[in-house]
Image (tube, rainbow, N blue to C red):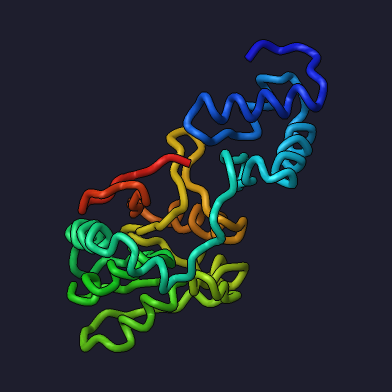
Amino acid sequence: MPQKNYSAAQRRQLIIEKLRDGDGAIHVEELSLGFGVSVATVRRDLDRLDRDGLITRTYGGAVLGNVRAEQSLREREVSHAAAKDAIARAAASLVEPGSTVFLDAGTTTGRLSYYLAQIPGLTVLTNGLNALNVFAESDTDVQAIALGGMLRRTNQAMTGSIAETVVRSVYADVAFLGTDCVDAARGISSRTLEQNNLKRLMSAQARRTVILRTLPSSTQTGGRIGRC
């Protein structure tokens, strides 16, 4: 994208074309560099396109078209259940008895809690209510610690300063994270800033980070890392 003095209307049209010609996602920094304008200007362009219903704003960028309203945890639990279970079993095989684990909120990570409950001597710190319920009902010696914080009802996750303070006080062997998308250069991204902050902090406080994600468009029983 050659740098020149585009009008706002021209920039917005080029953004749509770039989304259509690419993989359907774009980042603010990329557009700022390509157009030779400030990040704030690009954000205004994206906000206008979002209001017009042509794109959907995401954390740090945008995707083409309208994205369906976020599904509840219960809705997502029954979606691609076989793939999520396969991912969870594979993830559990990475955990040694006696380990300390960060377990992110989510459906695939929630499924992982069933397998973690079978591993002796674990300490699991989680912000997911579904995982906490699994540990509460299991007859094992897993020490489950709730991170606390503000409850986000849609995905039953606890986030915020309280959860972050607890995470900062621990160094874990492994962090299992769920995410809405993964970008090789920019890392993981979720729907809220609070969730992103907690995920990055979990990763920073763990010796190893494992991202668990299925692709909605996949028809196979396995999972993989997806792109934003």
Residue drawn at (19%, 62%), measured in percent from left and top? 89
Residue 209 showing in the rendered view: no
Camera-side residue of 148 and 36: 36
- Classify residue 194 by image quadrant: bottom right
Camera-side residue of 42 and 112: 42
- Classify residue 136 by image quadrant: bottom left
Camera-side residue of 52 and 148: 52
On screen, residue 207 above or below 152: above
Q: Is residue 62 left or right of residue 189?
A: right
On screen, residue 154 above or below 209: below
Q: Is residue 181 left or right of residue 175?
A: right
Residue 45 showing in the rendered view: yes
Camera-side residue of 7 and 208: 7
Residue drawn at (35%, 69%), measured in percent from left and top? 77
On screen, residue 9 above or below 177: above
Q: Residue 21 location, x and y as percent?
A: 52, 24
Q: Quadrant of the N terminus?
A: top right
Residue drawn at (18%, 75%), measured in percent from left and top? 118
**Number of numbered discs overlaid on the protein picture:** 0
Q: Is residue 228 left or right of residue 144?
A: right
On screen, residue 145 above or below 37: below
Residue drawn at (44%, 71%), measured in percent from left and top? 73
Q: Residue 202 location, x and y as percent?
A: 45, 58
Q: Residue 191 location, x and y as percent?
A: 56, 56
Q: Residue 84 location, x and y as percent?
A: 28, 60
